[in-house]
Image: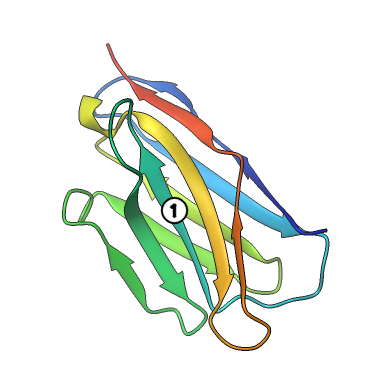
């Protein structure tokens, strides 16, 4: 059974940095897309950044130029480097990995809390 295991969340002051990691384990599938979503209290889950197996990435406007997504296909790991963090970045961050080719798959991690506060 595949699992996505996230790490790297925590409490940071405004302007600080954090690096999230998400490693997939449990099967041999490769993923077409890997990415990060977040959900703040009382809000819907939203896309933060995704990266395709080709390396093409996409970002939410609110995090462009501050966050960088990367992936290691051999390790089935995706990273999110978050710089210049703001209080509005506070949320639970969820890792996602999916296949849009056969066999179709869509997996979520358990979430990691990121809190930006002084």
The image quadrant where one finds the C terminus is: top left
The percent position of residue 36, horizontal first and vertical second, equals: 44, 53
- As drawn, 21 above or below 58: above
Q: Is residue 43 left or right of residue 50?
A: left
Query: Residue 25, located in which quarter of the rendered image?
Result: bottom right
Please report the residue visible at 83 percent of the width from the left and 60 percent of the height from the top.
26
Residue 97 in view (yes/no) = yes
Q: Is residue 97 left or right of residue 65?
A: right
Badge 1: residue crowd in 10 Å (few <14, some 14–19, many ≥20): many
Return the residue found at the far left.
61
Q: How many marks?
A: 1
- As drawn, 16 above or below 82: above
Q: Is residue 73 left or right of residue 14?
A: right
Please report the residue visible at 38 percent of the width from the left and 79 percent of the height from the top.
56
The percent position of residue 90, horizontal first and vertical second, equals: 32, 28
Color scheme of the displayed model:
rainbow
Asked whether 67 or 1 is in front, the reply is: 1
Name the secondary structure under disc 1. Answer: strand
Return the residue found at the far top.
118
The percent position of residue 4, horizontal first and vertical second, equals: 67, 52
Please report the residue visible at 83 percent of the width from the left and 58 percent of the height from the top.
1
- As drawn, 88 above or below 2: above
Q: Label 1 belongs to which residue?
A: 36
Query: Residue 97, located in which quarter of the rendered image?
Result: bottom right
Residue 86 in view (yes/no) = no
Please report the residue visible at 51 percent of the width from the left and 43 percent of the height from the top.
20
The percent position of residue 77, horizontal first and vertical second, equals: 63, 61
């Amino acid at each position: 059974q595949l699992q996505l295991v996230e790490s790297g969340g925590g409490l940071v002051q405004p302007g600080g940095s954090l690096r999230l990691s998400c490693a997939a384990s449990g099967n041999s599938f490769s993923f077409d897309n890997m990415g990060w979503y977040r959900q703040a209290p009382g809000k819907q889950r939203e896309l933060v950044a995704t990266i395709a197996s080709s390396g093409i990435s996409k970002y939410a406007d609110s995090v462009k130029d501050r966050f960088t997504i990367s992936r290691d296909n051999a390790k089935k790991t995706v990273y999110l480097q978050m710089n210049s963090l703001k209080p509005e970045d506070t949320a639970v961050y969820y890792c996602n990995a999916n296949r849009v080719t056969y066999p179709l798959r869509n997996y979520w991690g358990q979430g990691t809390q990121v809190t930006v506060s002084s």
